[in-house]
């Protein structure tokens, strides 16, 4: 039984992490080797030599042009994972090839397809264009989470926790006090959760970065494309300042907070986070402030979720949760993830939705 949804694209890395050094990361339980060809294309293949399983990311394994040479006995593989040379004989066994993965570089991320590669072409990769677009400045990072991905989904779908877990950074009383609206677009595979605060305290995260003094109109519009990409469209403006009728919104500050939620294993997750803004584009001090603040906020979540994972792991199955209105987005996301898991090939996916739901 697995909670990991296969036949999906997942963010494996930022493009900047992958160059001419051999780079390994475990995605959905699979150890994957990444490197860039001399032409700059990212490759993704199994990080286990077919001979005796030596990790190809491990020195003295190395790149030789567009070939990777195993550091144990010298099996040599091309960028497609096919073995092209073995030691001591000219004949290369026909089955000597590394599993290779469909890979796409987009919006500053390296996406990898986990599951049946024949399904990759027909499976959507959600977009986060601001992360790599003129007119926006982005800070980003990744924190390892020792908790199952579903706990991070729950966390991000219910921002009322900002008031309690992130007070003094992004949380103010209005976040928890303002009701949400939830919408599900099954066809597009998206869950939307909105919270519009008309007259709210400005948390330090926005006061310091935008320079707004006094109270604000604060909109939080979540758009989650399960299983991996979460976007929070955040709009901040002085109280009463609204978008123009034609849809333009020149007097507000816009922040796109993007998370990629990538399972590392059943019980650990790569927590990719990025904050893109459309103001103070060249102001390094704003970038530094947002990077530090957001990382602190992410680590507050990581600490809480690591504890929660330990608690849940130690409890018998079938524990009962109690859900309220703030949980409607999280529950909708769980249902969508459970459905994706049912449709996927391979192991029947388990309970993305715990018993009692
Ligand atoms: S383990 Fe790689 S060549 Fe032997
Ligand atoms: Fe949080």
Image (cartoon, rainbow, N blue to C red):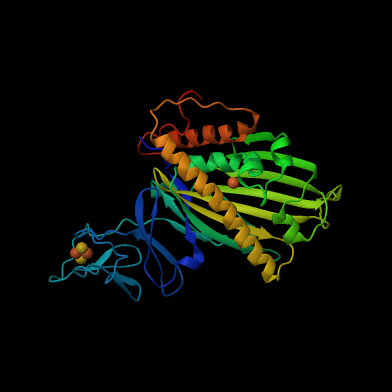
* Residue 10 in view: yes
Query: Seen from this angle, which residue lies furthest front?
Result: 168
The picture places residue 152, in percent across and down from the top left corner, at: 52, 43
Above or below — where is 241 with respect to 93?
A: above
Query: Seen from this angle, which residue lies furthest left?
Result: 88
Q: Please give the name of the residue rendered at 42% of the width and 75% of the height, measured from the top-left corner.
A: 38
Left or right: 238 as drawn, with respect to 257: right
* Residue 121 in view: no
Q: Please give the name of the residue rendered at 54% of the width and 52% of the height, measured from the top-left corner.
A: 299
The picture places residue 26, in percent across and down from the top left corner, at: 38, 54
Above or below — where is 80 with respect to 164?
A: below
Q: Nearer the viewer, residue 216 or 16?
A: 216
Above or below — where is 243 with respect to 347?
A: below
The picture places residue 317, in percent across and down from the top left corner, at: 39, 28
The picture places residue 234, in percent across and down from the top left corner, at: 70, 50
Left or right: 327 as drawn, with respect to 245: left
Q: How many marks?
A: 0
Left or right: 243 as drawn, with respect to 84: right
Q: Nearer the viewer, residue 179 or 29?
A: 179
Q: Please give the name of the residue rendered at 87% of the width and 47% of the height, measured from the top-left corner.
A: 240
Q: Which quadrant, please, contains the N terminus?
A: top left
């Amino acid at each position: 039984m697995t909670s990991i949804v296969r036949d999906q694209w997942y963010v494996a890395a930022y493009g900047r992490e992958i160059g001419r050094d051999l780079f390994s990361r475990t995605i959905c339980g699979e150890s994957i080797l990444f490197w860039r060809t001399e032409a700059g294309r990212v490759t993704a293949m199994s990080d286990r030599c077919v001979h005796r399983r030596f990790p190809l990311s491990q020195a003295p394994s190395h790149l030789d042009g567009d070939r990777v040479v195993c550091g144990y006995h010298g099996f040599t593989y091309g960028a497609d994972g096919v073995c092209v040379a073995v030691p001591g004989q000219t004949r290369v066994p026909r089955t000597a090839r590394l599993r290779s993965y469909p890979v796409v570089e987009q919006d500053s991320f390296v996406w990898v397809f986990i599951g049946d590669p024949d399904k990759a072409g027909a499976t959507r990769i959600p977009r986060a264009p601001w992360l790599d677009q003129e007119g926006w400045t982005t800070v980003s990072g990744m924190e390892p989470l020792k908790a199952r991905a579903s706990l991070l989904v729950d966390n991000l779908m219910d921002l009322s926790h900002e008031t309690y877990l992130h007070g003094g950074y992004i949380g103010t009383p209005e976040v928890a006090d303002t009701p949400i609206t939830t919408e599900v677009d099954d066809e597009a595979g998206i869950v939307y959760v909105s919270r519009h605060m008309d007259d709210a305290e400005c948390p330090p995260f926005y006061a310091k970065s935008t320079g707004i003094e006094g109270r604000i109109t604060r909109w939080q519009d979540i758009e989650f494309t399960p299983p991996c990409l979460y976007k929070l469209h955040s709009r901040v403006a002085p109280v009463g300042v609204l978008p123009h009728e034609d849809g333009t919104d020149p007097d507000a500050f816009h922040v796109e907070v993007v998370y990629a939620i990538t399972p590392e294993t059943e019980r650990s997750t790569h927590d990719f986070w990025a904050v893109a803004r459309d103001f103070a584009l060249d102001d390094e001090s704003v970038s530094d402030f947002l990077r530090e603040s957001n990382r602190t906020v992410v680590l507050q979540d990581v600490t809480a979720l690591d504890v929660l994972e330990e608690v849940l792991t130690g409890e018998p199955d079938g524990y009962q949760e109690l859900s309220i209105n703030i949980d409607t987005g999280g529950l909708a996301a769980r249902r969508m993830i459970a459905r994706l898991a049912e449709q996927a090939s391979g192991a029947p996916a388990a309970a993305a939705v715990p018993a009692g739901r």
